[in-house]
Image: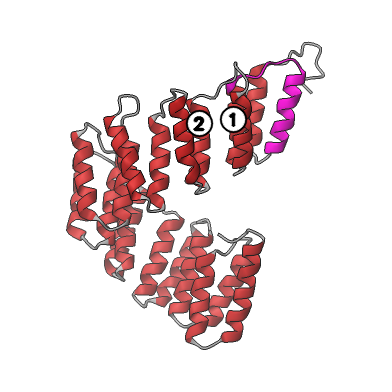
Amino acid sequence: MLKEQPFYQPKEATYMKLLVLLGRCGQPQRARQLFDEMVEEGIEPTPELYTALLAAYCRNNLIDEGFLIINQMKSLPRCQPDVYTYSILLKSCVDASRFELIETLYQEMDERLISPNTVTQNVVLSGYGKVGMYDQMERVLSGMLESEACKPDVWTMNIILSVFGNKGQIDLMERWYEKFRNFGIEPETRTFNILIGAYGKKRMYDKMSSVMEYMRKVQFPWTTSTYNNVIEAFADAGDAKNMEYAFDQMRAESMKADTKTFCCLINGYANAGLFHKVISSVQLAAKFEIPENTSFYNAVISACAMADDLMEMERVFKRMKDKQCPPDSRTYSIMVEAYRKEGMNDKIYYLEQEQQEMIGNGTLK
């Protein structure tokens, strides 16, 4: 419609907005067509426009096409890639676990005298941490601590604390917390939530309470995540009494519960053998209009399996599929184990066939 107006003049900013939009909408091929139309209309491509096109492909996990675009940019004197272009490619490689490409990109950046920024390094750090590549993670972190251009920030702090907290390496987590504080980095609410979650998983309730008291003292608000971490800690231990107390306190403070809250409650009641309370939690979640995602259904299916109620487990599984909520590998793992306990090999066979079919068409997470 805009093109049909008599006053229309092609503008770079218009095309930039559309390229970004198409990338977010999962239409990289349409973004490529639009880019070619833009060139035909006489707009000279810029590094920013090429980067937007590259981002459209990378956002949709088309990394090879992303590399084709950056190679095209390198051949054009006025469209050389910059730190933002490389950052997008690096993030895409991390998301796809293509870690073998990361060192190549770093070398290329070094040759072009492009320094990675803090955001880029944090993305790579997080990726290495998630897959257990701790040597590479520590190498990137050491480089940040020595760098003038990309010093660590609170995001860096949160990533490192999460990695060691999730591994249950509390001593290392605490040591790094002190290192970052000495480096001048101030914690935020998320930092404290990470500490609470880590202490909770190791049942270090005194330390968990100390962090929560410190948050109150320095006027950091308790958030839904704060309460979820506390509820999860007691849920994992099957401590229904303290779990309920935390949930009641959460509601008393008018804190909004989310899907994770109810997953934890359901797991906690199942661990405590209180299956009638699993049912009331599911009903309460429906009353609060809590979104029912794969994790939610997995929690209910697991509770049914623990209660040896395989008929109800099958009903929940059917409801999950009816609601267009895709099962994941954990869903199948829970159900196969439940059937195995009862020697129901025919059910296991059909489930495994269904799982293989989902793996084949790329829909299983």
Farthest-out residue, bottom: 343
Q: Is residue 40 left or right of residue 330?
A: right
Q: Is residue 228 left or right of residue 90?
A: left
Question: In the displayed structure, would residue 342 be above or below residue 353?
Answer: below
Describe the element under mark 2 as helix, strand or loop: helix
Say what amino acid the circle numbered 1 marks. Ile
Q: Residue at x 70, y 26 (%)?
A: 35
Q: Quadrant of the C terminus?
A: bottom right
The magenta-colored residue range is 28-47
Q: Main secondary structure of the magenta part?
A: helix
Instruction: For residue 24, say whether it is visible.
Output: no
Describe the element under mark 1 as helix, strand or loop: helix
The answer to which image quadrant residue 58 occupies is top right
Q: Residue at x 47, y 78 (%)?
A: 305
Q: Quadrant of the N terminus?
A: top right
Could you tell me if the residues under marks 2 and 1 are in contact, i.e. CB atoms within 8 Å?
Answer: yes
Disc 1 target residue: 70
Question: In the displayed structure, would residue 109 be above or below residue 165?
Answer: above
Closer to the camera in the image, 51 or 188: 51
Q: Position of residue 251 (x, y in %)?
A: 35, 54
Q: Residue at x 39, y 73 (%)?
A: 270
Disc 2 target residue: 86
Query: Please, which colouring scheme is shown?
Result: secondary structure
